[in-house]
Image (cartoon, helix red, strand yellow):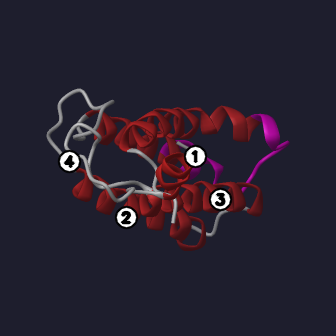
Amino acid sequence: MIRIPTRAHGIMDLIYSGALMAAPLVLKAMTNGPVKGQGIANKLLPTIGAGILTQGLMSNHEVGAVKALDMKTHMKMDLGISALMMAAPYVMNLDKRIKYPMIALGVIGLGLALMTKTKPSYEQAPTEKPDNFLEHVEKQVH
């Protein structure tokens, strides 16, 4: 399986958190008229986005500023946040115009958490065996 480097994960965390914080504006532009549960989503999505941004800046990867969280803990938190994002539309009985984008964002977060390496590049010891598929291909080409 292809493993995403922690640097790429950190950058994606910044983009993902920005998308969640901007979600109320996007949802408002996409929906015409009142939507069931939009007020809840307008508060929940930016809150989750701010949490992901904070978590990313505190994580032990190349983009992290504080490096207080190891990547395994970061991944577990990502899995929990993704599960919350996928379950919230059902628990709060949100309109389908909000439900499906929220579930899609949760699935993206879940995939990102499951596919990311658990050690940043500066902590990995050099090995002969490639760590992921792309490194294997590069080794075969050279």
View extreme (front): residue: 142
- Mark 2 lies on a secondary structure that is helix
- Mark 1 lies on a secondary structure that is helix
Closer to the eye: label 4 or 2: 4
The span shown in magenta is 29-43
For marks 4 and 2, the one nearer the N-term is 2
Closer to the eye: label 4 or 3: 4
Question: Is there CB contact under 8 Å for labels 1 and 4?
Answer: no
On residue 104, the disc is: 3
Q: Position of residue 80 (x, y in %)?
A: 37, 64
Residue located beneath label 1 in the image: 141
Q: Quadrant of residue 95?
A: bottom right
Residue located beneath label 4 in the image: 125
Q: Nearer the viewer, residue 86 or 14?
A: 14
Residue located at (69% from left, 54% from top): 101
Counting other residues with Cα less than 10 Å from the Cα at mark 4, is it few (<14), some (14-19), or many (20 or more)?
few
Q: CA distance from mark 3 to mark 1?
A: 36 Å
In this picture, residue 43 sits left or right of residue 76: right
Question: Is there CB contact under 8 Å for labels 2 and 3?
Answer: no
Residue located beneath label 2 in the image: 80
Numbered circles on residues, count: 4
Q: Quadrant of residue 106?
A: bottom right
For marks 2 and 3, the one nearer the N-term is 2
